[in-house]
């Protein structure tokens, strides 16, 4: 192929890709709830990243106390009120978002690659390899994530790091099951057989040929999983085995605020609403991506 022909082909491919992305974006934006979900996630991520700048009282995220200003209702100085030691609730929520997003990043950053790799191997090779991997996966899936995480964090020191380890220890299973089911149906397709006949190596077939066909359902699954990870992390913090004071864990803030209900309702209510909005944003975005890619994943 001449240089000129190759240049023309590259331009055609680039134009087709641009058109595909434009059509996909148009389909995505045609669903208002999906756009709202994306907007919520982007806004919260930006607020979390720039929390030291945008928080009214960034020093309140740590070991700060002001007993002359405890349990103040929402006001101009403190839009969401103060907690039992005088810390600004809004500032702590913004820093709490940081911890929640960090939990999501670590858990899915470990669980997704491990699950995808095991799913690829099990689905492609089949036989005893598939049996061993998937039976181990089924055994892990039989353990409720929250109960297993509670057991691990109870045995270890209750910290955010151990909560991440506890949740990540089981989260790979969902992605292993998802990818295995896709690869098992793809390994007999013509493009895989053609790659084998062309002498392509197994890593090339797995990562260059099959893996791209699993990316859409994996992306949808990751987005929906983020909400569940946040809820489990908040649940562990609520019962005292996750984020520990004075760190501003959202679940910890809800738990601390329950001691002052119903009079000082704002601590628990606004912290709970913060969790609700974050989880809702991920779920709305995930539902939009699922409709966009027209895939089904187990939630």
Image (cartoon, rainbow, N blue to C red):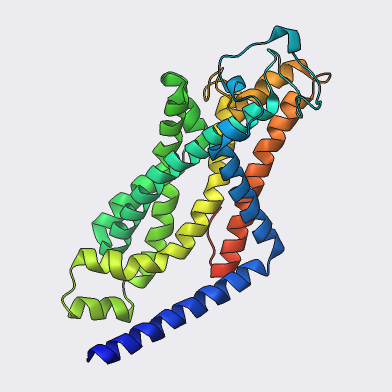
Assign the N terminus to one quadrant of the image.
Answer: bottom left
Viewer-closest of 172 and 28 = 28
Tell me if residue 170 comes above or below residue 84 in the rendering: below
Picture coordinates of residue 227, whole percent (x, y): 58, 45
Tell me if residue 123 comes above or below residue 73 in the rendering: below
Residue 286 seen anywhere in this rendered image of the structure = yes
Question: What residue is shown at x 63% (from left), y 44% (from top)?
Answer: 279
Picture coordinates of residue 104, whole percent (x, y): 49, 41
Tell me if residue 55 comes above or below residue 139 in the rendering: above
Question: What residue is shown at x 47% (from left), y 32% (from top)?
Answer: 148
Question: What residue is shown at x 61% (from left), y 55% (from top)?
Answer: 38
Tell how many labels.
Answer: 0
Residue 40 shown left or right of residue 293 in the figure: right
Picture coordinates of residue 101, whole percent (x, y): 52, 39
Viewer-closest of 138 and 227 = 227
In the rendered image, which quarter is residue 196 located in? bottom left
| Furthest residue in direction front, as rendered | 53
| Furthest residue in direction top, as rendered | 67
Residue 130 shown left or right of residue 97 in the figure: left
Residue 109 shown left or right of residue 209 in the figure: right
Residue 294 seen anywhere in this rendered image of the structure = no
Picture coordinates of residue 107, whole percent (x, y): 44, 40
In the rendered image, which quarter is residue 257 located in? top right
| Furthest residue in direction left, as rendered | 199
Residue 218 shown left or right of residue 114 in the figure: right
In the rendered image, which quarter is residue 55 located in? top right
């Amino acid at each position: 192929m001449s240089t000129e022909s190759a240049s023309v082909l590259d331009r055609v491919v680039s134009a087709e890709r641009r058109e595909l992305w434009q059509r996909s974006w148009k389909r995505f934006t045609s669903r208002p709830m999906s756009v709202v979900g994306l907007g919520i996630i982007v806004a919260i991520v930006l607020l979390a990243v720039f929390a030291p700048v945008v928080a009214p009282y960034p020093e309140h995220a740590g070991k700060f106390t002001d007993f002359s200003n405890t349990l103040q209702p929402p006001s101009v100085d403190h839009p969401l009120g103060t907690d039992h030691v005088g810390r600004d609730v809004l500032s702590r929520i913004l820093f709490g978002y940081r911890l929640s997003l960090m939990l999501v990043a670590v858990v899915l950053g470990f669980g997704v690659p491990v699950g995808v790799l095991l799913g690829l191997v099990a689905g492609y090779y089949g036989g005893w390899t598939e049996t061993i991997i998937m039976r181990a996966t089924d055994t892990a899936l039989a353990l409720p994530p929250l109960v297993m995480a509670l057991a691990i964090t109870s045995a270890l020191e209750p910290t955010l790091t151990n909560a991440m380890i506890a949740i990540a220890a089981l989260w790979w299973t969902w992605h292993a099951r998802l990818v295995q089911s896709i690869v098992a149906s793809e390994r007999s397709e013509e493009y895989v057989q053609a790659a084998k006949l062309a002498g392509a190596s197994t890593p090339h077939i797995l990562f260059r040929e099959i893996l791209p066909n699993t990316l859409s359902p994996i992306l949808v699954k990751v987005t929906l999983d983020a909400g569940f990870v946040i809820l489990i992390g908040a649940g562990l913090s609520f019962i005292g085995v996750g984020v520990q004071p004075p760190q501003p864990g959202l679940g910890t803030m809800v738990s601390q605020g329950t001691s002052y209900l119903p009079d000082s309702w704002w601590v628990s209510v606004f912290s709970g609403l913060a969790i609700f909005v974050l989880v809702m944003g991920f779920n709305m975005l995930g539902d939009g991506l699922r409709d966009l890619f027209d895939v089904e994943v187990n939630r």
